[in-house]
Image (cartoon, grey):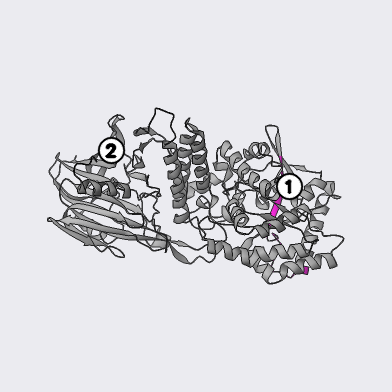
Amino acid sequence: MVIRASLSGRELPDVLEDKYQRLYKKLISFLYANSSYKLTFSFPGQFFSWISKKHPEFIQLLKELVSRKQIEVLGGGYYNPVFPLLLPMDRSGQIEMYGSELSGVLGKRPRGMMVYASVWDSSLISSLYGSGMEYVLLDNSLIPQSKRQLLPLLVTEQGKSVKVLPFFHEGGSAPAHEDPDTYLSLLKKQAEKVCKKNTEYADEERTACIVFDSDRFLQLFEEGWIENLYKKAQESYGESITFTYPQEYLHKHTRLIPAYIAPGIQSDIAQWGLVPYMPLENKTGYPVTIYDFLSTYPRNHALYDRMLYIGMLISNCHGDKARKKLAREKLWQAQTGNAFVCDPEGIFASNAIRQNAYRALTEAEKIIRDCLPAGKSFTESVTSYDYNADGTDEYICQMQSFDACISLRGASITELDIMHNTGNYADNLKRIEKFDRVDDHYERGLFVEHLFTRDEVKDYNKGLPTGSGIFSQVSFTQTGFDKKRHEIKLTGLGEYSALKLPVSLRKNYIINSNGFTVQYILKNESPLALKAALVVESNFAQTDFSSADCNSYSVEVIAGGEKNNLDAITAPECMHDISFMQITDTANDISFVYEPNEDADITCMPLYFHRPQPQNGNLQVAGTTFLVSLCWNVELAAGMEMEKTINFTIITPKRRKRGKKSASNPAEPQ
């Protein structure tokens, strides 16, 4: 039996202490008093480190149980990552980091491990072998039907081999809500049935590896079910059922079944990987892989893209080795599996976990910027390449105050990471009709453009979907790109209204250290006059996760020379003829300033995204975004065009402080 602790990485110390007091403290005493009861532990590295520091008495008993060969503590990646998504050096680095900690604390190095959500790929074999891992536990749903014989397997790749011990959740076909006697009887019958079908291995000892999540194990332990299970096994099944742990069993068991295990994820998670937020039986005949899962959930894929980018920066850094090592540890911290894959016992990888990962990646980049070789300093750049592996190039802006990614799809900013240790402000969900009653047919980034009729604008200002997606769904083309001037010129074409009037939008980005200047040239390409409304929309992801429906953004505007505060906390707010707008993320004291060259109408509102709870399907608020739009009325004769410009500035606390000093002492250089 294996007890697996699962953490999101965001738990407060009080939560960890409660988990320790309710389960682990009592469990270790129980095992210590019953030397014949054997158990296997699987801890996330962070949780093990916390216990080591806060409860050395637990570690002392744990060490004693290991030495008397009663328990085993499995290894793995320190931050519980999704291993196939990692570069080989990060895989081995995380395994080594946790293995060294276990060895230093317990005096024994782990020889086996679990992988997060049983996300498997055969490329892991070389990494595990090279890291000293002799065996890995994988969910039984990944094992080919012909190889499910309750025996260990052997998988090989390029001459390297690793043993695989298949496991069941709570006993697989023998659910743990049965009484212990029935439970053990079912396990025995299952083993006997397998033996009859496979006479070649009839004399081999079968093993049923049962994995319990810590919360489920706690429930069974408090009910006395676990203790009764041990007692019943000794009293009624002493000659046919024994308890062991992986290393002990595999040391005695030399007969292995050669097998190939295709890439996949354990079944209870794979069912969510085909259709967004809906469990679905896989009838495709092909296993669901982690890459299928990321394709189904674009926000998780975006985090993966950012992770790869930061990994590339670290690998290409040849400066201070100590700082480079620290940056890589920050990268590992961002690789926690909860940020990329859902938890079958809880909610999907939440915005909060994902934003924590983005924050760690930003910290890693800041460290890399400071550890360049002597005589070199950080240089701002705008480059173009296929950043997210979608077949088209994106523009990556690496500036003093921020990183940004500009996509040709909608010519919008799909990622905005502020260097002031915050997450990705463009990390927004989309509304789905099944859950939100409306569908968004475009990605909710920053500087997304719409061309609406006057009636459509009214619906839009109420938060309703409207329009035909002119420009927000259009794939723009590059008409100019100047790396030195940090200038990007893009053009999009569309058809307006039921008359399908051709229109074009030239959109030019000029990127600077603290923001963007965005120029728009809208042209009526039709022979008829055009009356419409040009809307420039930006969506700011939530950064305050004190509650699911929290909105931490405040709005200040200047209209007619007067300063006003907009109350758009819970409902839409509109204002006409503004010349200045400042959106402030009060949770991080970061502001975003819009200065249009001509007065514009504005709309601000929070949008809520609902998703089902995996346990019962009930809808819950799963995230929010804060929508900000600038709008101009457009009247263009045939062949005519109009120009609008927005200066967009990012103000961080550090810049505010400098600004205040400069105001009090004009002679001080800025």
164 part of magenta stretch: yes
Residue 23 makes an appearance in the image:
yes
Helix, strand or loop status at disc 2: strand
Total numbered circles:
2
The three-letter amino acid code for the residue at tag 2 is Asn
**What residue is rendered at 50% in x and 65% in y?**
617
Quadrant holding the C terminus: top left
Instruction: Give x and y (percent) for residue 135.
Output: 71, 44
Question: Can you identify the residue that label 1 sits on?
Answer: 147
Dot 1 or dot 2: first in sequence order is: 1
Q: Nearer the viewer, residue 14 or 303?
A: 14
Numbered mark located on residue 293 in the image:
none
Q: Residues within 10 Å of mark 1 (few under 14, many from 20)?
A: some
The three-letter amino acid code for the residue at tag 1 is Lys
Instruction: Give x and y (percent) for residue 98.
Output: 62, 46
Question: Can you identify the residue that label 2 sits on?
Answer: 512
279 part of magenta stretch: no
Q: Residues within 10 Å of mark 2 (few under 14, many from 20)?
A: many
Instruction: Give x and y (percent) for residue 644.
Output: 18, 43
**What residue is rendered at 72% in x and 58% in y?**
61
Q: Which residues are magenta?
A: 162-182
Instruction: Give x and y (percent) for residue 519.
Output: 22, 40
- The residue sitting at the top extreme is 375
